[in-house]
Amino acid sequence: QYCVYRGPSRKLTILNALSGLPLHAIALGGTIWCVAMGEANGAAMCAVSGESGTVQVFDAKHGTEEMCLPHEGVCYSVALTSGSAICFTQENTCIRYGRDESTYGWQDQPSYRALTGLLASQGAGWR
């Protein structure tokens, strides 16, 4: 249904996969190194990151930002799961946010422990 691409233009482009027509061109704060598609509650989602200092999840149909997580360094890989988990690299580590008591999934309400951890570590890319 959707085709997404990225690159050094610092722009995420979402196309209609059948017609090839552009649906959204979303300017981001740095070179984009990774893009992943997933689904949540029947909606197509797109996760994107790179040199911007954030991992962002967008609704592919509407082009709206659903979540923004700060990270340090460059992110070269991101993945979404059908269970509302997001995994991404941060320098030489892998970070996972998902459905358990200590982490935050992009379609879940955060636990108190996860939320306080995110607030306590607000970095330059925090929104």
Image (cartoon, rainbow, N blue to C red):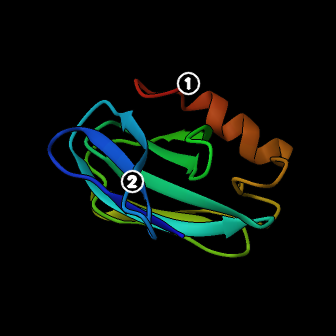
Residue 7 point in image, percent of width and height: 19, 51
Image position, residue 15 (x, y; %): 41, 56
Residue 20 sits above or below residue 117 on the image: below
**Which residue is identified by label 2?**
21
Relative to 28, is 18 above or below?
below
Of marks 1 and 2, the one in the foreground: 2
Residue found at x 62% / y 29% = 120
Please, what is the three-letter code of the amino acid marked with disc 2?
Answer: Leu
Q: Position of residue 26 (x, y in %)?
A: 40, 36
Q: Earlier in the sequence, mark 1 or mark 2?
A: 2
Q: CA distance from mark 1 to mark 2?
A: 31 Å
Horizontal side of residue 66 vs 76, given as left or right: right
Q: In this view of the protein, which residue sits in the foreground, 118 or 13?
A: 13
* Quadrant of the rendered image containing residue 105: bottom right
Quadrant of the snapshot with the N terminus: bottom right
Residue pictured at 40% horizontal, 23% vertical: 124
SS of the residue under disc 1: loop
Residue 46 position, x and y percent, is: 52, 57
Above or below, comparing residue 97 to residue 64 in the picture:
below
Q: Are marks 1 and 2 in contact (CB under 8 Å)?
A: no
Residue bearing the label numbered 1: 127
Q: Residue at x 55, y 41 (%)?
A: 63
